[in-house]
Amino acid sequence: MSVLCLCSYYQLLVHRVKDWSDTISDWKNFGPDFYITAQIPAATVNPSKVFVVGDGESYNGYHNKKLLNGQKYMIHARGLSTMTKVYSGFST
């Protein structure tokens, strides 16, 4: 079975970590070491184009902060939908 995600936006999230075993325990209260660095409309995503995390630019209201040399970061991506109608089943 496959799942179809009709995403309206993609968000890139940056998590500054002390070591690679750091995890996120609360996805609602990230703290100062975790932030959204960009929100990109799904319609503009081009798989052949490179997105540079930490370029200092702003993307749809989010500042893509420059990254610090020598610091470790985990990058996360998530899809968001603006759909408000829920379908309970499919008919043919």
Image: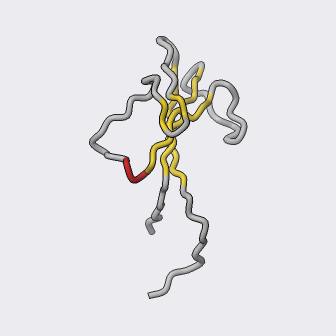
**Percent coordinates x, y for residue 88 in the rendering:** 60, 77
Give me the residue at 32% from left, 46% from top: 46
**Percent coordinates x, y for residue 60 in the rendering:** 51, 40
Q: Does 43 appear above or below 49?
A: below
In the foreground, 36 or 71: 36
**Percent coordinates x, y for residue 72 in the rendering:** 51, 20
Give me the residue at 45% from left, 48% from top: 41
In the foreground, 89 or 43: 43
Figure quadrant of the N terminus: bottom left
Colour convention of the picture: secondary structure
In the foreground, 19 or 14: 14
Q: Does 39 appear above or below 7?
A: above
Query: Residue most toward the left?
Result: 48
Is 19 placed left or right of 3 in the picture?
Answer: right
Q: Does 1 appear above or below 77?
A: below
Which image quarter: residue 25?
top right
Figure quadrant of the C terminus: bottom left
Is 36 placed left or right of 43 in the picture?
Answer: right
Circle count: 0
Which image quarter: residue 50?
top left
Give me the residue at 39% from left, 29% from top: 52
Query: Residue most toward the bottom?
Result: 92
Query: Residue most toward the top?
Result: 70
